[in-house]
Image (cartoon, grey):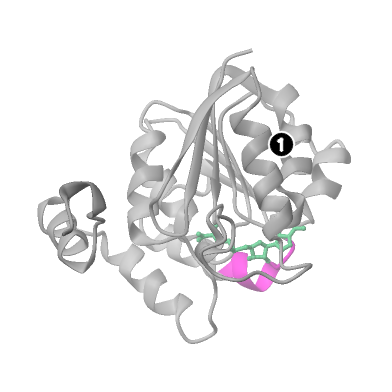
Amino acid sequence: MSSDRDWFPGEAELDFIESVARPLPPVLRDLEIAAEPGGVPIVSRQSGRVLGALVADRSRVVEIGTAIGYSTLWMALGQPEGGRIVTIDPDASRTAVARDHWRRAGVPDAQITVVTAKALDALRGGEPALDGPFDLAFLDAVKQEYAAYLDELVPRLQPGALVVADNVLWSGRTAGSRPSRPGDGTAELRAFCAGVLGDERFRGTILPVGDGLLVAAYRP
Ligand SMILES: C[S@@+](CC[C@H](N)C(=O)[O-])C[C@H]1O[C@@H](n2cnc3c(N)ncnc32)[C@H](O)[C@@H]1O
């Protein structure tokens, strides 16, 4: 016999969340549609809503992995007046689509700076936009590089900053409920999660939202 403890949210709960949430801004819906044909991977809508809430009092955000700017726009719309986001992606064709949609959503160009580069090159190369300090760092690019991104970012984090990382449950592969293959990033994601959540400088957990969202507060 199943008990309440066995229960897990499904479609009905997602529908309920959408029914009580603020209406989705049309440009975010447009980006969800734009992501579909080419299979551009973007955060789930619920992960976007979490990001939008987490940035409500965070003015200085760095994002690794812009794509067409869906997660960036959730954060830009959630930030306080005067907020700034620096977002890194080497794929300028994607970030051009992003900028077009941010403008259509009424986000001032000055709010979002795009760094067109591989993240580790940019972080190690002295790019001034990445000097920090940052109140929130969102990781959503190469899964095998998450730990290296964090190593580079920690010295630029304000005490109390949040580190958020997407895909840490990796469609069931991280926990082993679905099979993984060597080289698919699973081993690195397991090590990253254990490393951050076991690090005395962080207090965090993994939210089972979307593909798994690690959220950790930096308290050195
Ligand atoms: C999962 S997508 C980002 C999705 C986006 N955060 C969203 O939810 O709307 C990952 C992005 O990382 C970018 N990427 C790939 N290698 C990268 C690197 N070395 N540094 C930074 N970004 C990289 C890809 O071009 C891709 O657009």
Residue 111 sits above or below residue 20 on the image: above
Q: Amino acid at mark 1?
A: Leu
Viewed as shown, does residue 89 lie left or right of 12? right
**Is 218 in front, or is 179?**
179
Residue at 49% from the left image edge and 65% from the top image edge: 42
Residue 34 sits above or below residue 89 on the image: below
Label 1 sits on residue = 150
Q: Is residue 106 visible?
A: no
**Is 29 in front, or is 146?**
146
Q: Position of residue 48 (x, y in %)?
A: 38, 52
Dominant secondary-structure state across the stretch colored magenta: helix
* 52 in magenta: no
In the rendered image, which quarter contains the N terminus? bottom left
Viewed as shown, does residue 19 lie left or right of 184? left
Label 1 element class: helix
In the rendered image, which quarter contains the C terminus? top right
Q: Position of residue 198 (x, y in %)?
A: 63, 27
Quadrant field for ligand 1: bottom right
Q: Position of residue 143 (x, y in %)?
A: 69, 56
Q: Residue furthest bottom?
A: 37
Q: Position of residue 151 (x, y in %)?
A: 77, 33
Viewed as shown, does residue 199 lie left or right of 163? right
Span highlighted in magenta in the image: 90-96
Q: Is residue 61 visible?
A: yes
Residue at 16% from the left image edge and 51% from the top image edge: 3
In which image quadrant can residue 14 be found?
bottom left
In which image quadrant can residue 116 be found?
bottom right
Residue 186 sits above or below residue 208 on the image: below
Q: Residue furthest front?
A: 1
Residue at 70% from the left image edge and 68% from the top image edge: 91
